[in-house]
Amino acid sequence: MSESVPLIVQRTIAAPCERLFSAFSTADKLAQWFVPSPDVQVSVLVYDFKEGGAFRLRYDMGEPRRPVVAGVFEAIDRPNRIAFTWVWQAPDPLEGVPMTVVFEFKSRSGSTDVVVTHYGIPSDGACTVHEAGWKGTLARLEARMMETHTA
């Protein structure tokens, strides 16, 4: 995959933009859904949700797979857009590769189109893995919205 072609994943979720955006607002909220599948857990090691603030997440995918990703929030435009850097840490095969992820929330008659655009993925194989991960993450976000809506 060429670095100039971003990965774009989209899902329409029956929740307003503000609720979806708020799912990012604290480490506790993020930890409830920001995983690629229900069998993966995330530990939020650092989370400063503001422009210029850093984050660091460790995913527990079963021993010995515990990859760590870190980044910085580059833009936060409530409730429309969140942009952040995305850099896997050692010993991940993509260690140190600078990438950027943008979440956009577009209102659509009672629902929201959530669009994830991931820039800088260095290979087709890595693109396939990240596509599956973002699709799963958006499914978890939708499930979280359903849980909190009925709670």
Image: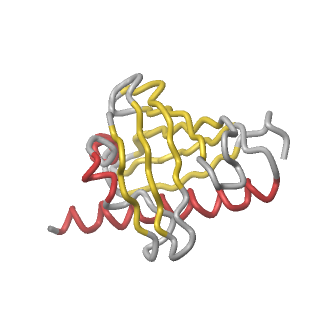
Image quadrant in which the C terminus is located: bottom left
| In front of the other: 35 or 89 | 89
Left or right side of 63 for 51? left
| In front of the other: 72 or 64 | 64
Left or right side of 64 for 7? right
Query: Residue 117's image quarter?
Result: top right
For the image shown, how many numbered marks are present on the structure? 0
Q: Residue furthest left?
A: 151
Q: Image point 74% across, 55% down: which residue?
A: 126
- Can you say whether 140 is above or below 122 in the image? below
Left or right side of 57 for 97? right
**Rendered location of residue 61, percent (x, y):** 51, 71
Q: Image point 37% across, 51% down: which residue?
A: 111
**Rendered location of residue 66, percent (x, y):** 52, 64
| In front of the other: 2 or 55 | 55
**Rendered location of residue 105, percent (x, y):** 43, 40
Q: Image point 56% across, 56% down: which residue?
A: 134
**Rendered location of residue 3, percent (x, y):** 79, 37
Left or right side of 103 for 130? right
| In front of the other: 137 or 47 | 47
Q: Residue furthest right?
A: 2
